[in-house]
């Protein structure tokens, strides 16, 4: 009886530990090899990770965990995973579902994400996963202030050893820099450098949640365009036009400019003076755009070039003044699109708009993005389908000749990068009879105006007859 009374609490303890640590309840996974390639050539840190996994447990594994340091997880903008199927020329990559794992109190305060495998990994089998993710605001300017003629230096902080919840047999990390100008870097033997690439590893037999911090101090003269706030308004008119208006609040988030700005020096020595400044922006717009305009608070700006064809449109815009580190600019871009290229009808009779979600500016981070889709008056039952989590709500907008207002779908998302510029859909119900509302209002207004004129001419308003 005494042995039985002792065994029951032990079972409860093991069950409680399995809730805290996913490695207790999940099948045992081992990382046979891990290759990580970090691209620092712009202000967006892009990481390509290849993992070869083996199930060494006693049961099948249906998901795999990824670990990120807390500072990196906060600025994680994109996280994708895929697995290869087929061989050589017939090889295809199948995307996998990635979701945050609700696990707390992990070593090194690691944030975990769960990758759902396409098919369970059986005992003794291996699989290869391709992981891609983008981290924003990870390059810290140092020094924080530079003069007009100085180069921009930044700090990059990471770990030479892959942070993983599993035992890693062998791993290597490659860091690609914009140039061979590297001031310093942390050495974790074996460490080597070749031209624009740093190599950390190969490191063997590392236990779970191993971490070895490193700092790379390098030159990166790429401008750091950050849109602090972007509001994109898409107004649908069933008379054949889709009008898009974008309000930008832009900032150069690189090393702040100190001293006095010299326009003469900036124009006479463009390769030296203001080498990290933001001289122009390139916006990738849909094909066949029309009525494009670009203006700020002062008025229209003609310093832009539009190249358009049936495949794509590129708008190269130059701000009213070059943006150095810490400088800001606000402006508006507007254009129209043929509605028949973006509005379709589903099988159940509902109409839906199919447009791109993110910011059209290339290599730009958007801290706060708001997309407003203004539906025609009389639209009902709106539904937005976005391929990633966003905040959704509805509001009512009023425009010319509106009676009850237009239903507007509002989508909000933070930490947006160019990879978010993918299509999304907004479904809604619409009765074509509502298209007659505005013409009837115009006809009625003109008719009432003529009635008022006729009445004025025929009514005698004098006090006495002449």
Image (cartoon, helix red, strand yellow):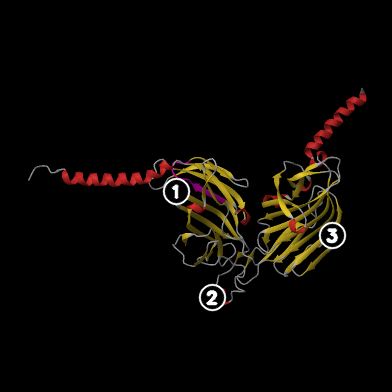
The disc, 2 or 3, on the residue closer to the chain's N-terminal end is: 3
The magenta segment is 369-379
Secondary structure beneath dot 2 equals helix
Q: Residues within 10 Å of mark 3 (few under 14, many from 20)?
A: some
Residue 252, above or below 434? below
Q: In the picture, residue 121 is in which quadrant?
A: top right
Q: Nearer the viewer, residue 211 or 447?
A: 447
Q: Is residue 31 left or right of residue 113?
A: right
Verify whether residue 353 appears in magenta: no
Percent x, y of residue 331: 50, 59
Asked if residue 360 shows in the view, the reply is: yes
Report the residue marked by disc 2.
Answer: 264
Q: Earlier in the sequence, mark 1 or mark 3?
A: 3
Q: Residues within 10 Å of mark 1 (few under 14, many from 20)?
A: some
Looking at the image, residue 325 sits to the left or right of residue 304; the answer is: right
The alpha-carbon separation of the residues under discs 2 and 1 comes to: 51 Å
**Nearest the eye: 247 or 291:** 291
- Which numbered disc flags the more N-terminal residue, 2 or 1? 1
Q: Which residue is mark 3?
A: 202
Q: Position of residue 217 (x, y in %)?
A: 73, 64
- Would you name the residue on which mark 1 appears? 238
Disc 2 versus disc 3: distance between alpha carbons?
51 Å
Quarter of the figure with the N terminus: top right
Give the side of residue 49 with respect to residue 440, left or right: right
Count of all numbered marks drawn on residues in the image: 3
Q: Residue furthest bottom?
A: 268
The answer to whether one can see residue 296 in this image is: no
Above or below, 315 relative to 433: below
Nearer the observer, 349 or 233: 349
Residue at x 83% of width, y 31% of height: 12
Of the two numbered discs 2 and 1 in the rendering, the one whose residue sits closer to the viewer: 1
At mark 1, the secondary structure is loop
């Amino acid at each position: 009886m005494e042995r039985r009374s002792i065994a029951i609490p032990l079972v409860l303890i093991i069950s409680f530990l399995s809730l805290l640590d996913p490695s207790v309840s999940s099948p045992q996974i081992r990382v046979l090899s891990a290759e990580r390639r970090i691209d620092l050539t712009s202000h967006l840190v892009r990481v390509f990770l290849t993992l070869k996994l083996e199930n060494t447990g006693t049961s099948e594994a249906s998901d795999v965990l990824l670990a990120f340091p807390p500072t990196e997880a906060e600025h994680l903008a994109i996280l994708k995973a895929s697995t290869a199927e087929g061989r050589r020329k017939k090889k295809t990559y199948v995307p996998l579902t990635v979701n945050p794992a609700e696990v707390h109190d992990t070593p090194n305060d690691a944030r975990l994400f769960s990758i759902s495998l396409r098919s369970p990994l059986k005992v003794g089998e291996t699989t290869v996963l391709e992981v891609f993710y983008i981290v924003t605001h990870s390059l810290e300017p140092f020094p924080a202030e530079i003069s007009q003629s100085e180069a921009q230096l930044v700090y990059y902080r990471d770990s030479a050893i892959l942070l993983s919840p599993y035992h890693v047999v062998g791993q290597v990390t490659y860091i690609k820099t914009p140039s061979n100008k590297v001031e310093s870097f942390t050495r974790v033997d074996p460490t080597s450098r070749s031209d624009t690439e740093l190599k950390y590893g190969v490191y063997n037999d590392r236990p779970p949640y191993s971490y070895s911090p490193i700092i790379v101090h390098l030159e990166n003269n790429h401008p750091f365009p950050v849109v602090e706030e972007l509001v994109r308004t898409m107004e649908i008119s069933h008379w054949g036009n889709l009008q898009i208006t974008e309000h930008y609040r832009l900032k150069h988030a690189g090393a702040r400019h100190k001293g006095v700005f010299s326009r003469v020096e900036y124009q006479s020595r463009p390769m030296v003076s203001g080498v990290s400044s933001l001289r122009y922006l390139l916006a990738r717009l849909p094909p066949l755009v029309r009525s494009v305009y670009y203006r700020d608070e002062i008025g229209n700006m003609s310093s832009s070039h539009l190249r358009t064809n049936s495949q794509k449109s590129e708008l190269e815009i130059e701000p009213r003044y070059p943006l150095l580190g810490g400088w800001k600019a606000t402006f508006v871009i507007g254009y129209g699109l043929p509605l028949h290229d973006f509005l379709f009808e589903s099988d159940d009779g509902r109409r839906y708009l199919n447009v791109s979600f993110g910011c059209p500016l290339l290599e730009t981070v958007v801290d706060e993005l708001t997309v407003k889709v203004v539906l025609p008056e009389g639209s009902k039952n709106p539904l937005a389908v976005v391929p990633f989590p966003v905040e959704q709500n509805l509001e009512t907008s009023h425009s010319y000749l509106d009676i009850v207002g237009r239903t507007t779908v509002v989508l909000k998302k933070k930490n947006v990068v160019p990879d978010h510029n993918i299509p999304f859909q907004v479904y809604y119900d619409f009765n074509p009879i509502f298209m007659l509302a505005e013409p009837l209002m115009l006809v009625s207004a003109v008719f009432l105006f003529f009635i008022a004129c006729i009445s004025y001419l025929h009514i005698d308003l004098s006090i006495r007859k002449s």
